[in-house]
Image (tube, rainbow, N blue to C red):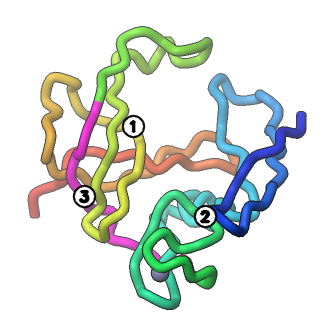
C-alpha cells in the first residue's frame, strides 16, 4: 500500500511517498523513507544518530527537511550519547492491537536527550511503578528482524 505523507514546513511543502512494509513481524515495524533511513540504519548497527544542522549546529528530531531552529536545509547525521531523562511517560495496560499482548504493561515515554531533542520511545527492563519524571535513562537496542532494530531506553547504569 502506498500512502502519501506530508513533510516540510512553509513555504517548502513537499510530498514524500511512504511505502508500507508487509506485516511479517507480529507488530507493525517502521517504514523508513529518504528522511528517516539514516536513523533506522544507525539503530540497526547499535548507534543512536540524529540530524545536526550544518548551519547552527543544533540537533533536531524527528527528521525533517529544514532545521526547526534556523530553517537551513543542510544537515549531517551524528552519533549522540544515548543518555537522557524521562520528560513524560504513560503506562500501557491494554494492548493497542494484536501483537502487543505479550508486552503489556509497558511504558511509553518521551525522553529528553542530553543533546536537546525529545524522542518518543518505549522503556525496557523497568517496572512501570519505578518510572518517574526526570529519571535518568540510556538507549538500548532491540532487534526486531533482519532489517529493523528499535531504539528503546532503560534505566541509566551507575558507573
Ligand atoms: Zn539550524
Residue visible at 63% across and 62% down in the picture: 9
Would you place residue 107 above or below residue 139 in this image?
above
Which residue is denoted by mark 1 in the rendering?
122
Q: Is residue 86 magenta?
A: yes
Would you place residue 53 above or below residue 81 in this image?
below
Would you place residue 93 above or below residue 146 in this image?
above
- Ligand 1 is within 8 Å of the C-beta of the residue at disc 3: no
Q: Position of residue 62 (x, y in %)?
A: 52, 57
Query: Label 2's element?
Result: loop
Looking at the image, residue 149 sits to the left or right of residue 94; the answer is: right
The furthest residue to the front: 11
Residue visible at 80% across and 38% down in the picture: 21
Between disc 1 and disc 3, whose residue precedes? Answer: 3
Compare residues 149 and 92 and report the one nearer the observer.
92
Q: Which residues make up the magenta segment?
A: 77-89
The furthest residue to the top: 94
Q: Where is residue 72, by image quadrant?
A: bottom right
What quarter of the picture does the C terminus occupy?
bottom left
Which residue is denoted by mark 2 in the rendering?
64
Per the picture, the main secondary structure of the magenta-coloured stretch is: strand
Q: For residue 84, which numbered disc appears in the image? A: 3
Q: Is residue 49 magenta?
A: no
How many C-alpha atoms fall within 10 Å of the one at disc 2: few (<14), some, or many (≥20)?
Answer: some
Query: Label 3's element?
Result: strand
Q: Position of residue 53 (x, y in %)?
A: 50, 82
Amino acid at each position: 500500500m502506498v500512502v502519501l505523507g506530508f513533510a516540510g514546513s512553509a513555504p517548502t511543502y513537499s510530498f514524500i511517498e511512504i511505502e508500507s512494509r508487509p506485516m511479517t513481524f507480529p507488530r507493525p515495524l517502521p517504514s523508513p523513507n529518504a528522511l528517516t533511513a539514516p536513523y533506522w540504519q544507525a539503530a540497526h548497527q547499535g548507534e543512536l544518530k540524529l540530524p545536526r544542522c550544518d548551519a547552527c549546529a543544533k540537533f533536531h528530531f524527528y527528521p525533517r527537511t529544514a532545521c526547526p531552529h534556523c530553517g537551513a536545509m543542510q544537515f549531517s547525521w551524528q552519533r549522540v550519547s544515548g543518555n537522557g531523562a524521562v520528560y513524560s511517560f504513560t503506562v500501557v495496560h491494554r494492548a493497542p492491537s494484536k501483537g502487543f499482548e505479550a508486552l503489556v504493561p509497558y511504558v511509553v515515554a518521551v525522553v529528553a536527550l542530553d543533546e536537546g531533542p525529545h524522542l518518543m520511545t518505549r522503556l525496557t527492563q523497568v517496572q512501570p511503578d519505578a518510572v518517574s519524571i526526570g529519571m535518568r535513562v540510556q538507549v538500548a537496542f532491540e532487534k526486531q528482524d533482519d532489517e529493523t532494530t528499535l531504539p528503546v531506553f532503560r534505566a541509566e547504569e551507575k558507573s
